[in-house]
């Protein structure tokens, strides 16, 4: 016998993060009367994750107020009451019955829904090595995890950062700015080899080494060892291509940033189509194969006209996809078309990336790398596919349009004296 629904909600949003909160705002703008319920497993109100590894981690901002105004939250607390948006915190959705249109929660509630949004995001990947669970070995995804790392960072602390993706590099930069001694361990041979040229990898690596970081590219972590207080005391590494010899790096804490695992289990258990690599399969309206069920944010595997089936684990996609899903949940007919965008801040570098970067593209640098102000343009198959801007975002909107239009270069892209628009057809 199916459990009986305790109440009916017009718009049920599972996830409790940026995508869910953005969808709630967009729904309320289009439907002033429908009931909205956000269900999130974390106890804080919905917040933004980008500052957790940057300005929040090195204490430039705190957890009071909204993002962009000295805090991290999506909306002030009073916004939810004023807009009749209910938020259940510290509660996890356990089961979706797409036929009955109900969701069972771990607090015993069963909610009947009119429209359902799955914005379940992801969780940090963990290393399958000895000592991963030792005190002092951290991952970073949640506010609680950021708080634990922020409390541990102090001048002189020995910090090993595992992984040199954006989370790894941002946490390493924050630790260096806090006066820590930092070692970065990465099995790949250089920074971001799938995305940038060796010249650009070298540029970013120098920013860290010149500030005192030790870079161990081409090495993998094979374990964490205890100190006398039963916390982490060292990280054991080996060459990524030869595990026969290991070495120990003493540390006071370690931060593991090796990507996320998408939270697709709820969707899969409900019988929804799930792409093993990209998440919950949706159409170009962000609807799943179940009537009235949508997905947004990191976990949505949407069709892209250039990249094919993809998902995108960044702040901008969470907002844009949630807005499209909300429009369609409220009777709209919007297709999700979005040039991927992400940003990062490291030391005095403001990074903005648009489009579909690939190391297979022809990458041309426009500007002055020595002055830390340049744009790298990616041309692949004869069209502009991506742009990486470092302290050089004045042309961002134009570049977004050129990438969307699959513009073809007609001039010397390295000539910064030429107007950018005149170099494409």
Image: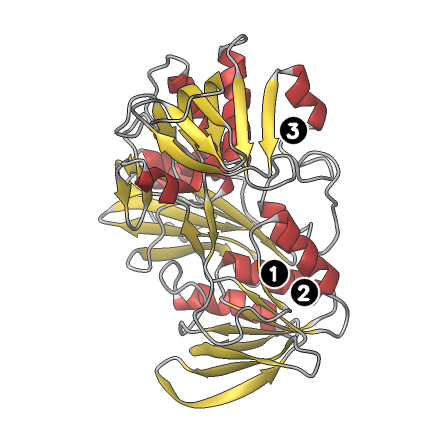
Q: Which mark is drawn over residue 75?
A: 3
Residue, x 72% and y 65% (percent of image)? 153
Q: Secondary structure at mark 3?
A: loop
Q: Secondary structure at mark 2?
A: helix
Instruction: Note whether 133 is above or below 411 in the view shown.
Output: below
Q: Looking at the image, which is closer to me, 261 or 361?
A: 261
Q: CA distance from mark 2 to mark 1?
A: 6 Å
Whether pointer 2 and pointer 1 mark residues with C-beta atoms closer than 8 Å, the reply is yes
| Screen quadrant of the C terminus | top left
Instruction: Note whether 213 is above or below 351 in the view shown.
Output: below
Q: CA distance from mark 1 to mark 3?
A: 25 Å
Image coordinates for residue 42, horizontal then vertical, percent: 59, 42
| Residue sticking out furthest to the left | 381
| Screen quadrant of the N terminus | top left
Q: Looking at the image, which is closer to me, 363 or 54?
A: 54
Residue receiving disc 1: 171
Residue, x 39% and y 25% (percent of image)? 102
Image coordinates for residue 248, horizontal then vertical, percent: 55, 86
| Residue sticking out furthest to the bottom | 245
Q: Nearer the viewer, mark 2 or mark 3?
A: 3
Q: Is residue 410 in view from this perspective?
A: no
Q: Which mark is drawn over residue 175?
A: 2
Residue, x 44% and y 46% (percent of image)? 313
């Amino acid at each position: 016998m199916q459990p009986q629904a305790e109440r009916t909600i017009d718009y049920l949003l599972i996830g409790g993060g940026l995508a869910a909160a953005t969808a709630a705002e967009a729904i309320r703008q289009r439907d002033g009367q429908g009931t909205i319920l956000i269900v999130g497993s974390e106890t804080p109100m919905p917040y933004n994750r980008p500052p957790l590894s940057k300005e929040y981690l090195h204490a430039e901002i705190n957890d009071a107020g909204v993002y962009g105004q000295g805090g991290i939250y999506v909306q002030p607390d009073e916004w939810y009451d004023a807009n009749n948006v209910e938020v259940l915190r510290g509660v996890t959705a356990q089961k979706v019955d797409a036929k009955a249109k109900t969701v069972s929660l771990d607090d015993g509630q069963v909610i009947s829904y009119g429209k359902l949004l799955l914005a379940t995001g992801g969780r940090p990947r963990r290393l399958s090595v000895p000592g991963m669970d030792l005190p002092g070995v951290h991952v970073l995804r949640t506010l609680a995890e950021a708080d634990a790392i922020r409390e541990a960072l102090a001048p002189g602390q020995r910090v090993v950062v595992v992984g040199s993706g954006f989370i790894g590099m941002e946490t390493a930069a924050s630790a260096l700015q806090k006066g820590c001694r930092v070692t970065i361990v990465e099995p790949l041979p250089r920074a971001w080899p799938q995305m940038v040229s060796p010249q650009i990898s070298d540029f970013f690596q120098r920013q860290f080494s010149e500030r005192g970081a030790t870079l161990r590219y081409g090495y993998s972590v094979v374990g964490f060892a205890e100190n006398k207080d039963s916390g982490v005391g060292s990280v054991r590494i080996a060459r990524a291509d030869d595990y026969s010899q290991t070495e120990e790096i003493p540390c006071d804490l370690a931060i593991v940033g090796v990507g996320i695992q998408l939270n697709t289990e709820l969707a899969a258990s409900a019988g929804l189509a799930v792409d093993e690599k990209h998440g919950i399969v949706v159409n170009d309206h962000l609807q799943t194969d179940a009537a009235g069920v949508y997905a947004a944010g990191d976990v949505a595997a949407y069709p892209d006209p250039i990249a094919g089936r993809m998902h995108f684990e960044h702040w901008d996609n969470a907002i844009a996809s949630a807005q499209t899903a909300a429009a369609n949940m409220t009777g709209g007919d919007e297709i999700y078309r979005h040039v991927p965008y992400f940003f990062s801040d490291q030391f005095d570098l403001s990074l903005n990336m648009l489009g579909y970067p690939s190391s297979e593209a022809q990458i041309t640098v426009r500007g002055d790398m020595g002055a830390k102000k340049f744009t790298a343009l990616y041309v692949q198959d004869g069209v502009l596919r991506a742009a990486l801007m470092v302290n050089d975002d004045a042309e961002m909107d134009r570049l977004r349009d050129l990438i969307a239009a699959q513009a073809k270069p007609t001039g010397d892209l390295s000539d910064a004296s030429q107007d950018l628009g005149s170099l494409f057809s």
